[in-house]
Image (spheres, rainbow, N blue to C red):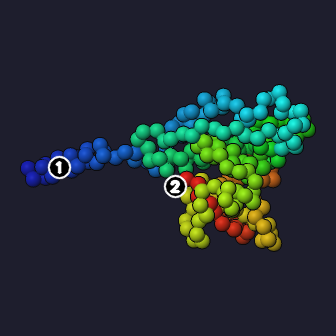
Amino acid sequence: MITRRNLMLFLALLAIGALCGEARSFPISDTIPVEILSADFAERDQLPQSDAPESTWYTGEHGSWGPRAASYPAVEAPPGYPPLSWKRERIVAVAKRYIGLAYQHHHIPAWDPAGEGKGLDCSNFTAWVYNYGLGIKFTSLIHDQSDGPTAPGRRLAPGVPFLPGDLLFITTLDRTRVSHVVIWLGGWEKIIDSHGAGVRVRDFAGWYKDCFSHARRVVE
């Protein structure tokens, strides 16, 4: 039997829920729909990947790595979504677009020299993802990306939990120098990088984990 007191309590709870719903500035789900993250991908795909005229790409003037990347325009999270979460998940969405792309020492994914085909190496991949995804352009040189005045974001202190989009730097087996970089995806310790067979989602295990050096956070 519904008493007057119970009915009033129920109505009060409904009112509180409505107020909380109005105050919430982002969806209940922690995962932002991919269509929100990728809404402008078609538009960005029409932008030139390099400022160098395509007619010069294969003349030899750009060296063996091809033309350098253009600077993509910055983007902001759409209204109603938490900006940092949107940007981090946007980086993940952009990185996953390139699954299957080969490993090549190229600056941009569109460069397709005869006998090599398209591809990106590890640090050009991470630089490209941030450039295309958020309009954040940084060096594609692995050592400068790892540390120094031109390195992106900030170096995380040891033990700080990783967040999606963080850059993780890996050393050689003898741990004498940083030789690789990956993007942290999160859940079940997954990463994405360009290495060996190309761009793949991989486990943060084995060499990656054993030779981990440090991480950098670009989005914060």
Q: Amino acid at mark 1?
A: Ala
Q: Residue furthest left?
A: 4
Q: Is residue 201 left or right of residue 91?
A: right
Residue 62 image point, x, y percent: 84, 39
Mark linked to residue 104: none
User: Pointer 2: what residue?
Assistant: 220
Q: Tell me the crowding category of disc 2: few under 14, some 14 to 19, or many 20 or more residues within 10 angstroms, Cα based.
A: few
Q: Nearer the viewer, residue 97 or 67?
A: 67
Is residue 11 shown to the viewer in this render?
yes
- Taking the spot 84% from the left edge, 31% from the top edge, the residue there is 56
Q: Residue furthest front?
A: 149
Q: Secondary structure at mark 1?
A: helix
- The residue at 42%/39% (across/down) is 79
N-term mark: 1 or 2: 1
On the image, the x and y values in percent for residue 1 come to 12, 51
**Picture residue at 74% right of the left edge, 43% below the top:** 100
- Amino acid beneath label 2: Glu
Q: Residues within 10 Å of mark 1 (few under 14, many from 20)?
A: few
Q: Which residue is mark 1?
A: 12
Tell me: 19 left or right of 78.
Answer: left
- SS for dot 2: loop
Res 191 visible: no
Foreground label between 1 and 2? 2
Whole-percent x, y for residue 126 in the image:
69, 50
Q: Nearer the viewer, residue 108 or 141?
A: 141
Q: CA distance from mark 1 to mark 2?
A: 38 Å
- Residue 95 is situated, as x and y percent measured from the top left of the image, at 65, 46
Most foreground residue, 124 or 198: 124
From the viewer's side, name the closer residue of 188 and 53.
53
